[in-house]
Structure formats: structure tokens, C-alpha cells
Amino acid sequence: MIVATGLEKSYGEGRQRVPVLRRVSFQAEGGTIFTLLGPSGSGKTTSLRCVAGLESPDGGEIVLGATTVFSSARGINLAANRRRIGMVFQSYAIWPHMTVAGNVAFPLENRGIGAAQIRARVERALALVGLEGLAARDAPNLSGGQQQRVALARAIVDDPEVLLLDEPLSNLDARLRWQMRQELVALQKRLGLTILYVTHDQEEALALSHRVALMRDGAIVECGAPLDLFERPTQRFTAEFLGLANFLPCAAPREAAPGGTVAVDTAFGRFRARVCVSERPEVELFFRPHHVTLASADAAGEANVGAGTVADLACLGEINDVTVARGEARVRLRLHASQRPAPGAAIAFRLEADAAILFVPPR
Amino acid sequence: MSDRVDFGGVALDAVPPRRAGRGAAVSWLPFVLGAALALAAYLAAVPLFVLIASSVNASGAHLPFETGVVTLANYAAVLGDPSTYRLLGNSAVFAIGSTVLGLAIAVFFSWLIERTDIPARRFLFVAVLIPMAIPNMIYTTSWLQLLDAHTGLVQVTFQQLGVPFPALDILSLGGMIFIQGIALASHAYLLIAAAFQTVDPTWEEQSAISGKGRFATLRRVTLPVLRPALLSVVIFFLMVCIETFDVPGMVGLSAGIQVLSTRIYWATHPEGGQLPDYGVASALALILVVIAFALIQLYQAQLKRGRRYVTITARGFRPKRVALGGWRLPLLLVALALLFVMVALPLFMLVWRSLLHYYVYPSLAALGLVGLDAYRDLIDEPQVPAAVANTAIMAAATAAFTVGFSMLAAWLTVRAPIGGGWRRLLRTIVLLPQAVPSVVIGVAFMITYLRVPVPIYGTVWIIALALATKFMAYTTGSLSAAQIQVAGELEEAALIAGAGQFKTYRRIMMPLMAPALLNCTLWVVIHAIRELVIALTLYSPSAQVLSTQVWGLWQGGQIDDLCALGVMLALLLAVLLTLPSIVTQAAAVVRGARR
């Protein structure tokens, strides 16, 4: 388990002081994958490096398992080499002057373990990541994917309390990335690892995390199970960052109690939506483009049915990406490949119940 | 020149700021940082401070600080003396003349070898670099034999051929410039060739397309593009020539001509039973420091400007060579003639003279006089083996200390989890000696350890300490650059794996920096062996090193022994200079065998 509480950090001095972490708190349960997701500069890697002990926060507390590794209040700051963690760096950081076995054995050498046992555990770790038989290979003579696996083997060989992964898949090509993602999830399940995962790729975060914390400007915007964040974001930033999203400006409804349901009018028609207080000043209706189906023309005017003309159509193979216009307003829909409206034609669409959220500004 | 196969203060200033990891504070770090700062300050700042103090101390015939009276009399004496301005004039003429001559030769060879299709490039390249293995005092000795007014090989040969030889006197300022100029050409070649390698050939091709000939292209495109790089090399060698001691010291001793650096030495080591004047020496030394400091500022500024012109791209182009056509043969002949003068003549004279008890014009008949007596003398005379042992100790100690300290300083300034203010402070102190000429370091150490009760005065250890002070800016610079080449994550990965800072350094950093460490160590060893003036100001008759031995043989007129010693020194330096490439090739062979 990883518990981070109120982490604060800034770089620079005096007037040029730039805060990079603003009271960041999160809790990753043991045996799960917890992901810090956000755009670059959002503080996710800094948070990870604080957990690793490669950076020291200015304030806050970090507990790994039963050990408090950092506490500004109690003056605790355990050095990185005494935290019992495994870590995979974005660049893999494979030591080029060693063999594969030398790389993987290195963490064990610092534990006073006998040579025979080291060899056995290195072999086991290499087998776990699918690199049997490559132990004697020189590290520079490895492909990118193999280096990634060596880094992973090195990180897990000493049964770490937590495993830290800093954008581990970002240097791989698309096919390999998908494969490694599957293997990583399988490995985590098999070994019951506690993983803190950092990525800027929302698809990756959704696919492999048990929980996701979305970060922006050094603070956590929202934290929750991936599907909850995707389908029921409480912040506009979450809605926007996690995938394709429609935001339709609309008039503020009279009574909009947070959590309640209201009907709002947009350029395309009237929709029912759950009210959610956002940090932004606009009143906007949010829904994801895939939550719609085509409706018959005479359904126009019904609740949750929108109407307009097809402004643009992009066929993406399995789906069609349709832009619908009405006046100045635009909305994007994702339809099954079999549904292909003609550009310029009138179109009506039905939004699934409970799919829309109305973001209103705080009072 | 002070024999620096140096790429200047480039390395340390090329260090980009890196957001280093700031993990948990290491408990011993403040002590290590404190120790490094104290050591650097002790080496670099204390002698400089003592020098300043001694320059404002009434001195005359007294030891430094004996009178305790603070006065500007030394400066008044120095600035009021017309001979001071003659010294400055000599220094300026010497530095400018040698730099122009040396760089002209170096530019010619760089262009020829790097940018044209001249035949026998590999041979020319090696030949140009040979003089680097010959210490300047040996090179000078050889030339003084070659151009001796009465018996000089060159003059006599001309005479025998019936060609009148111009009445040139090698024992003159012009002679000094000639020797210094051709001696520094090899060093300058390395720097300028590196710059030539960065010229984008498409610019030259563009010029050719525009109808410019080869030489117009060289004059109108290639050289202007290289101007910032060339200017920084010019300033660098001006600095080297201003502070150098070997050539003006040896020629000047016979010719009675002094420049600033030799005057400082003679003020502390007067001949003819006079007493040393430490006050005047200190004042002159500070004038030299000011000049050197101004030049180094100019140099840094020029380097910065040069970086805006950077022509290296990541494309890794292989520069296309200029086709010389009908000029190939004439230019090759010019190059060979130059090499004959720069390399063949002095080397021949060195070997020839070492085989003869007294000088005889080379002829078949003279071959009968040839013998190895001088070499036997070197072994039989007890001083020489002692000097060899002392030199070995001194070079090893200097290398161990300089490289050891620089490893620590480079780690502290690049990677250690310490504040930026501390980094800058350490960097500044370590860089300080860069602007301090060797003769000044020697004199400053001498004055300091005359007064400081550390019992190293007159031993090889004080020479090692002074050399370490002189060299630490360069070695820290190049090790910092090497450290930056090693990605920070490689180091962090070892920390995460549970290794402490020390083990991380030993197991990860050191193997990855091994080539740089080897190069740095060899650089220090080579320069420690070649260095003359620091050893000369600090040695005592009971603790001679090879370079002071050479100086002594010169003063005593034992030219055959000197040349024999020179031959052995040159062989030793040649081995040391080629060691890195031998090691690299051996490593490649080993790697190949393992595959």
C-alpha cells in the first residue's frame, strides 16, 4: 500500500519559485495498479519520484506498507536505496556495461544473498518477463522491447514493496505497447504487485488501472475507478482529458441542485442531464459521442433527441465519426460502421438515458 | 608554451544546467562538500591570496612578510621601471608572433588533411602530431643545435652547398618565436582540425556552384565560417604563449632576453649571488595574472559567440573533400617540406647529438664517433635514476590527487543532491587556477610554503600539489562533461536497486566514465612529466625531477646527456600519448572475441 498525504514541492528560489506539487494526496491499495494520469508538467512524474525517494517533497508524508519513508512533520526522509522499491524508468536505464544477468542481479547484490540463490532468482525473474536464455547477452545488444523486459525483471527481482512505473510503455511501438500492457496486467495479478503507474496516455490508464488519479498543474483533479471517471466525471477537465467529449453551451436551468436531474435546452434539442458543479464559469452539457443512436426524423422534438444536419463524416473502419451542425453549434457522434448518414442530410440522434452531465459553475 | 594538449576551459562551461535529482539528504554529504571546498580553496585561493599580500609587503632583500610593512612600493618600482614595459613588449611580440606562425601552419595542415583529397593523409596526420611527444625544452635544445651561429647544421649545410644563408640569429626574440611557433603548431592542429570537421560541405559546394575556385572558396566561405572557432583558438594560444616559460627561458638564458614569465622566475632565482626580490616578483606575477584573466574572459566570451555558429548537426555528415587536381603534388611537397622542418630535422638532431660526446657535422666519417656513452652516463649518474623515481612518484601523486579530486568535484557539481549556490561556489574555486600562469603558481607556492609550517617545502610533494592546482580546472571540466554524458537515470536506477551513493559511483559511474578517467589520468601524467617552470621554482637539489634535470644539463652545457634524456622522454611520452587508442582497440578486440 502507498499512502501519500499532502505532498508539496516547488522548484526555484525566491520570486522564481514555481510550485510543482500542491497538496497531493492519494492512496494505492496493496495488490492493485494505481495510475497517476495527466498532461506533461502536471506533477505526476514528480509525485512518483517523491515516492521513489529521488526527489524530496517540501512537505507531506509518504507511507509504503508499514514504513513511513517520508514525513516533513516528523523529519523522516529515507534514502531511495533504503525504500525497497522497484522502478522502471521511461528510458529503462539499463546499465550498458553489464550483461542482462548483471543488470537483474544488481538489486540482490545489495542484500547479502548467496551467489547460487542470486542466480536462481535472476533466472526466475527473467522467466517471468519472458527472457529465458538471454541472461548472458550484453545489455546494449537488446531491442527496445527486450530492454523494457530487463528493466521490469530488475524491478521485480527483489520482491519490492511497491513497483513504480514511469511511462514504461511510451518508447514502444503501438503493437508492442499493447502486448506489454497485457503482460504487465498478468504479471501484476500473478505476483500480487502494488504498482504506482505514471502515464499521459488516457487509454493506457483506463485499460490497466484499478484506480486513476487525474492530475493537472501539480494537483489531483479527480480520483476514482477508471470507468467512473470516464462515464461520470465531476470535473470538466476529467471529461475532456479522458476521451472524446461534446460540450454544448446552454442556458442555466432555474433549479439545478447538484446531483439532481434537470432538462436543459441546447441548439440541438432538449436533454435530461445530471447536474454537476464544475470549476468553470460556463454552463455546458457534456456527453460522450458514443452514447447516441440514430433516431427517426419524426422523433425530433422528443426529450433526449437532437436534430441537425451532417456537416462532416469520417469513416474510421469500425465506426463512423459524424459531425452534426445546427447553426453555429457542432456536436460529434460516433456511430456503428453500418450507419452512414450522407453529408448535408438532416439527421436526428437519441442520447442514451443517464449519459449526459450538466456542468454548472459553483455559486 | 606550457605544453597543454588542452581544449581550453571549454568543458566546464559547456555544462548545461541539469535538474538534478534531489533525493533524501545523505548524512555524510555536508562533510564531503565541506572537505572538497576547503581543499579547493586551500589549493587555489590561499597561494593567490599570499601572492597579493606579498606584493604589497615591503620586501627588497627580505623574505616575504618579514617586514610586516604594507606598501605599494613594489608596484611603484615595477611600474616606474622602463624595463617592465620592455618585458611587456617582448611578451606581446613573442605571443603574437608565435601564435600567428603556429596557427598558420596548423590551419594549412588542418585544411589539407581534413578537407582535401591530398594523398598520404594518414601519414601527414601522424607526422604533424609527432612533436607533441617532444617536451618543448628538448625541442628547443635541438633547434639551438640546428641553428647555432657557428656550428649549426643548417648554416653549415648551406655553406657546403655554396648557398649564402641569411644571417639569422636563433638567440633572439625572432628565434624564440620561430621555435615556439612550430612547436605549438601540433597542438593547434588538433583544435583546428576539430573545427574543420564541422564545416558543412554543402556550403563549400554552393560556393563552387557559384563559380568560386578552390582557394576562393577557402578564403570566402570556409575560413569565415570557422572564424569564431579560429578566434577562440587564437586567444587560447596567446594565453598559452604569454604564460609559457620553456622556450623563452632556455633561449633567453643564452640570449639575455626576458619576457614577463621568465622575469618573474629570475626575480626569485637571481644569478650571480643576488638576493631574490619576492615583492617585485609578486607584483609582476599579479600583472601577469591580470593579463591572463583578461584573455580568459575574452576566450570564454568568444567560445559563447562561437556556439551560436555551431555547424555540427545530428546528421552525421561525412564532409566531402575538396578535389585539389593539379595542386595535389605541389601542396604535398609544401607539406612534406614543412614536416621536414618541424619533425625530421629536430628529431634527427636530437638522436644524432645524443650519440656524440661533442658535436660533429653528420657525415660517414663522423659515424665512427657514434656511441651510447651519453645513455650509459644517464644510467651511471646517480641523479638520473633518482630523478626518474622522483618523477614517477610526482606524476603518480599528481595524477592520483588531481583525478581523485576532480572525480569528487565533478560529481558534486553535476550530480550530488546539493544546492545550486554550493555548486557554483565549488565550480568557481576549482576554475580559478585556470587564469593563473604556471610560473605564478610556482612562485605563489614557493612564497606560501616558505611561511606555512607544512614540511613539504623542497620535496616532490610540493611540486605535485602545485601541479594539481594547475591541472584541476581542466580535469574537473572534462570529467564533468563525461559525467553529464552518463544519463542520470542510470545512476538513479542503482539507488532504487538498493545501492548506496558510493557503490553506485563505483559500480555504475566509474565503469561508464572509464575512457574519460583513463584519458584524464594520462593527460595529467604527460603534463606532469613535461612541466618545467613549476618544478623549477619548487624543486630542491635533493628532490630533482626529470624536467629540472634537463634544465640543469642545459645550464651545465651537457648537451649529449640532455639529448639522450630527451630521446628517452620522447619515447616515453609517445607511448603514453598512444595508450588510449591502444586500449580502445584492445577493448574492441576483446569485445569482438566475446561475441
Image: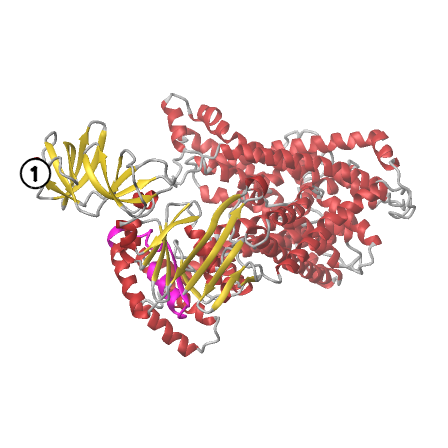
Residue B536, compared with residue B495, is above or below; it is above
Residue A169: where, in percent of width, then height? 32, 54
Mark 1 crowdedness (10 Å alpha carbons): few <14, some 14-19, many ≥20: few
Residue B373: where, in percent of width, then height? 70, 58
Q: Is residue B59 left or right of residue B295?
A: right
For the N terminus of chain A, the quadrant is: bottom left
Residue B580: where, in percent of width, then height? 52, 55
Residue B296, compared with residue B593, is above or below; it is above
Q: Is residue B379 left or right of residue A328?
A: right
The residue lying toward the viewer, choosing from A1 and B326, is A1
Task: Check if residue B538 falls in the magenta segment.
Answer: no
Instruction: Specify the segment rendered in magenta.
Output: A148-175
The residue lying toward the viewer, choosing from B1 and A61, is A61
Query: Which residue does the numbered mark 1 point to in the structure image?
Result: A296
Residue B343: where, in percent of width, then height? 58, 43
In this orientation, does residue B412 appear? yes
